[in-house]
Image (cartoon, helix red, strand yellow):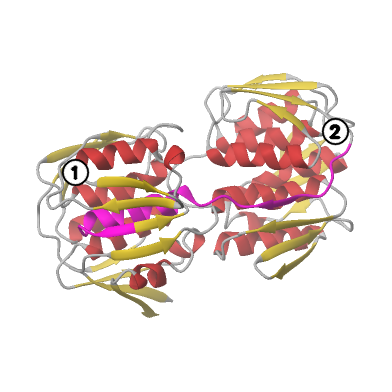
Amino acid sequence: MEKIVIKGGVTLNGEVQVSGAKNSALPLLFATLLADGVSEICNVPDLRDINTAVKLLRELGAEVELQEGCYQINTRKIQSVEAPYDLVKTMRASVLVLGPLLARFGHARVSLPGGCAIGARPINLHLKGLEALGAHIHLDHGYVEATTDGLRGAKISFDLPTVGGTENLLMAASLAEGETVLENAAREPEIVQLAEALNSMGAKIEGAGTAVINIQGVARLEPLECQVIPDRIEAGTFMIAAAITGGNVLIRGAVREDQEALISKLIETGAEIRPEADGLRVIGPKKVASVDIRTSVFPGFPTDMQAQFMALMTVAEGTSRISETVFENRFMHVCELQRMGADIQIDGHSAIIRGANQMTGAPVMATDLRASASLILAGLASENTTEVSRIYHLDRGYEKIEEKLAALGAQIWREQE
């Protein structure tokens, strides 16, 4: 087991390059199953979740090679339509093979998913949508068994916007007969990239990035060639790293349009945000002002940035309230921040943070992916040394974060427990 060690109190300065977006790369990798041939996807981050996705593709019979930073995926010899529990339990996004396998082969058997323990994330909206397209679905010993004699377009209205559900239905409907309309669809940039990628394969999709998406099914899709967009959550994490240390950092690859909700809140804290040719420059405030946030689906404040923003609020002057509306169990990092001196009280689905306390280093334990990042951020702003254990969560979604922070001047490294 490894841990990350941080000696805090260093102001970050310099430039950092954002890696490709994990949450875009995963559906793109699985979208290759829709076509017969060799696809190429570049700018894929080196992460545990990506490695799991590659193992799953190989389990299905795909040939996957990494050459010069690009993945080549040959799907001509798919031999299985089953995504086994041993792989799916470690990464929730594995359920995204369901739509492509069903659409291309008429059959899929996928284990119910796992992932971070941040609350219930049922896939009932995925299954309800696939049933509307004509799939026959039943649960069998922890597996989703889906069959069809041919998917047909339908009008599908999601009860709630669902990123994974929208992605699964986008892929499945691309090969369905006739027109499919997705209402109350997710609007995230990763949805837009997936739709654009599918269109490059020959799909006919309009409206991605809005609440209503129209898909005209086609009989066949061609292999995919694309480059993964920058990771907006990683970019946001570095933006907060600059703010919490009072630093001056250029985040290359950060896209302002993808960060509007976070940017507006950082400006309220006193940070300065400057758009530059290839990214965003963040200049941290001398004194951080307290700000209230409420998480929401895109384009609202992202739940994946809530834990990191809470770390910033622990050093802010005044009292702030952070309300979590997306996941019911996403305050597990609070007790670890309290170990470092944070004054945080839980009030239902909100956390009240009384800031301006001098945070002090302590041994802490990561409970999920974004909680890992929040503890590192808190460590950057703390006196003495912080040790973050269970960083296998971190490696699911951040590529060499300790090396990138060290290049900005942070005293941070990885070592064995």
Q: Is residue 409 left or right of residue 68?
A: left
Can you see residue 64?
A: yes
Q: Residue at x 50, y 51 (%)?
A: 231
Q: Is residue 288 left or right of residue 224?
A: left
Front-lying residue, 103 or 25: 25
Q: Which quarter shows the N terminus?
A: bottom left
> On the image, numbered disc 1 is attached to which residue?
270
Q: Which quarter shows the C terminus?
A: bottom left
Secondary structure at badge 2 equals: loop
> Separation of disc 1 and disc 2 at Cα?
55 Å
> On the image, numbered disc 2 is attached to which residue?
148
- Where 51 falls versus 294 (above or below)? below
Of labels 1 and 2, earlier in sequence is 2
Q: Position of residue 10 (x, y in %)?
A: 21, 69
Q: Residue at x 46, y 48 (%)?
A: 232
Amino acid, disc 1: Gly
Q: Position of residue 363 (x, y in %)?
A: 25, 70
- Where 86 falls versus 231 (above or below)? below
Front-lying residue, 230 or 416: 230
Front-lying residue, 78 or 66: 66
Q: Which residues are magenta?
A: 220-249
Q: Position of residue 364 (x, y in %)?
A: 28, 65
Q: Residue at x 36, y 57 (%)?
A: 250
- Res. 138 image quadrant: top right
Quick one: label 2, few (<14), some, or many (20+) residues within 10 Å? some
Q: Is residue 99 left or right of residue 335?
A: right
- Where 204 falls versus 25 (above or below)? above
